[in-house]
Amino acid sequence: MATLSMLIGPQTHPSLHIRATSLDLPLPDSRTTSKSKDKGEIISADKMQVYEGLDIAANKITEEEMNGVPHHHLIGILPSHADFTYTDFCCMVNEKMDDIVARKRLPIIVGCSNSYIKALVDDEVYNFRPKYECHYLWVDVAISVLCQVSSDRVDQMVEKGLIDEDEETRAKLLKKALDEMRINSCKIARRQVEKILALKNDEGWNIHRLDGTNVFSKHGRKSSNA
């Protein structure tokens, strides 16, 4: 069984990658440890850092911050218009891990896209769990400190030139934000329906259902005036 380490945290921030470059981690096929920059190769588990551009917005680690670790995989490898699904992530990561392990080095998965990480660990196609002995490391931060760091990070991003990043990057960010708004709006609507059903079924409220499906389907945005 091959060995790998996984470093996770609460937000996209280069400090996770920076921390990973200086850890003492278990070496493949041994019980000894070594600095990650000597034997480790980092695989990014960040669904935004995979895109070209977005260097400031995605807080990509700089060459100086890499601390001598030459390999940081899955960073800046896709055009900004490309899709990057759970399946894409699992496939790419597994290919990288197989290559790294074959060279007797240590894969270190680092990032905060936890839904993608969970998909990787639970994936039955690549047999992640029986294939790897994984050391999970969680960088936990007090909420008060985390909120302050997050706030400061926005200011630092602006100072580094976030506003001046190229038009394509801004378009990508806008598209992502709008996509997330659409998804969140749908989630909120589902939760609202669930709460109403709970009031009806669990609380016993005498609620009369009015089916507005046809009105919404036929009139779209105009349905609010119906």
Image (cartoon, rainbow, N blue to C red):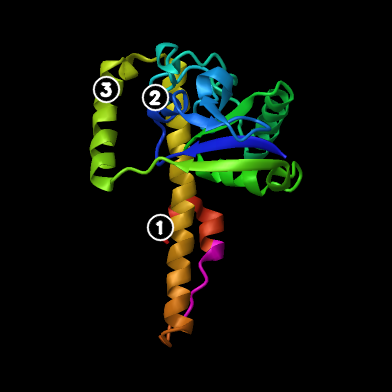
Residue in front for this viewpoint, 112 or 178: 112
Secondary structure that dominates the magenta span: loop
The residue carrying mark 3 is 156
Q: CA distance from mark 1 to mark 3?
A: 42 Å
Quarter occupied by residue 133: top right
Which badge, 1 or 3, comes first in the chain's sequence? 3
Q: Would residue 65 appear left or right of 201 to someone viewing this image? A: left
139 lies left or right of 116? left
Q: Please say if the residues under marks 2 and 3 sit with CB atoms less than 8 Å apart.
A: no
Side (left or right) of 170 relative to 109: left
Q: Which residues are magenta?
A: 208-214
Q: Is residue 4 above or below residue 130?
A: above
Residue type, mark 2 in image: Ala
Q: CA distance from mark 2 to mark 1?
A: 36 Å
Badge 3 crowding class, 10 Å Cα cut-off, few under 14, some 14 to 19, many 20 or more, is few
Q: Is tag 2's residue or tag 1's residue first in the polypeptide sequence?
A: 2
**Quick one: label 2, few (<14), some, or many (20+) residues within 10 Å?**
many
Q: Which residue is mark 1?
A: 224
